[in-house]
Image (cartoon, helix red, strand yellow):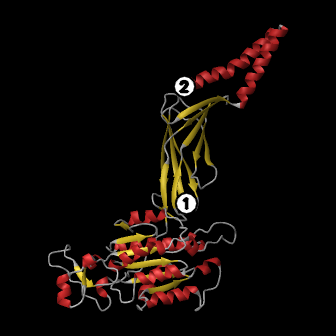
Amino acid sequence: MAGSEFGFTTRATCLLAAGATALLCGVLLGQVDLTRAGVLALAVPLLSAVVVHRSRVLIANRRRVEPEHASSGDDVLVHLTITNRSRLGSGALMLEDQLPSSLPGKARFVLDSLASRESRTVTYRLNNLSRGRYRTGPLQVRLTDPFHLIDLRRGFTATTDFVVRPVVDVLPALSPPLARDLGDNAGSHSIGTHGADDASTREYRTGDPLRKIHWRSTARMGALMVRQEERPWQGRATVVLDLRESAHVSRLASDGAPDRDERDRSSLEWAISAAASIGSHLLAAGRAVELISDVDAVRPLASHSTLAFVEHLAGVHGSRNASLAPARAVLASTARESALIAVLGDVDPISLQVLAECHPRGSVTPAVALLLDTGTWAGNPASGPDSSCHNAARVLRAAGWRVRIVRHGTGIAEAWRDTLAAAPA
């Protein structure tokens, strides 16, 4: 418990003022009965203050939330267990719990008096929470005497932190092919007989560090060969999540109330949910997964835990970057040794160039993209074949990407199935 505040209620203040006035008038006018009434009026709140202050009622508080792992749109229950640990019973208690900063007001309850060692649990509901991180508490307790003359406030320090994760859909049992399964270089990666520490080789590509040139293989093959640190049997995959605010569209529900499913309102929330679903699906299949969501990050986020991956996405926010250009080097490096799965909003010309260059046609590693037709989230009809969305899809396909244009109302499982079923360019 953080501390307490002790004070008189309005009723007690009025009684003290009346008692003081009666006492003064009784003394000045020589009226004994009026003087006695004044003394009595002063004594009642003062004695109540002494009794409440010396009662030392000890109140304990335990907190928990349910469900432990909530998803966007879920209702969360906060349970508060109040225990009177003193030998004396308490008066009526008013409980006031601080709600998360994104929600207005406070949760208030009134409890009848608690007997000694008695516990009682109260519950309140937080409805239709959006994806994010939340904190409830601390709790404040107000105690009063039977006459409601004294107001004693006691505050706790304990809070409850919980995470509302993006919705994770179950995807069909399909995964992007491994690097060794694609193209003319399929099977060309030599896996050493001494285990995972042996490096495989591939042909030199512009931008590869000279220190990676494998001279023995170069002499044998008659072409520049470089050591490749890729371990195709591990099936590494990198999820690229486009968080640029300028690339996405949000709308309000037609009746003014928030949508139960945020993905129906916001293309950004659909993209985040898709990234969470795809990452969880690949991790469950035993693939090593990395995430590029912050285009300013030097390195992608690696994850080996589905829960950690999804909870990280619970806290991501829209980015003010105008393009994916800051991630050019990271994307180019990652695309050489990892399958790329991109969830994209509107792709501007610079971002489109970055994506096409990071995965040039003929690359060994696969690349798939879910390209959102964001105008449909604003209620517009599907874009036509001459739109920027379809043009971006053509450019990416020409660079060897498998692309699926996603419109409002399309399920993540459907988009994932159709993207992987499409023939590579």
Question: In the image shown, does 103 or 373 lie closer to the viewer?
Answer: 373
Question: In the image shown, does 395 or 70 lie closer to the viewer?
Answer: 395
Instruction: Identify which amino acid the numbered label 2 is placed on.
Output: Ser
Q: Earlier in the sequence, mark 1 or mark 2?
A: 2
Please give left or right for residue 396 compared with residue 36 in the image. left
Secondary element at image label 2:
helix
Instruction: Identify which amino acid the numbered label 1 is placed on.
Output: Asp
Residue 168 rendering spot, x and y as whole percentages = 46, 70
Please give left or right for residue 258 compared with residue 28 in the image. left
Residue 222 rendering spot, x and y as whole percentages = 21, 91
For residue 169, say whether it is visible.
no
The residue singled out by tag 2 in the image is: 55
Q: Are marks 1 and 2 in contact (CB under 8 Å)?
A: no
Work out whether 415 lies above or below 88.
below
Q: Looking at the rendering, which quadrant does residue 280 occupy?
A: bottom left
User: Residue furthest toward the front?
Assistant: 210
The residue singled out by tag 1 in the image is: 75
Secondary element at image label 1:
loop
- Quadrant location of the C terminus in the rendered image: bottom left
Residue 1 rendering spot, x and y as whole percentages = 50, 36
Residue 340 rendering spot, x and y as whole percentages = 39, 79
Give the number of marks: 2
Q: Looking at the rendering, which quadrant does residue 225 occupy?
A: bottom left
Mark 2 neighbour class, 10 Å CA radius: few under 14, some 14 to 19, many 20 or more: some
Mark 1 neighbour class, 10 Å CA radius: few under 14, some 14 to 19, many 20 or more: some
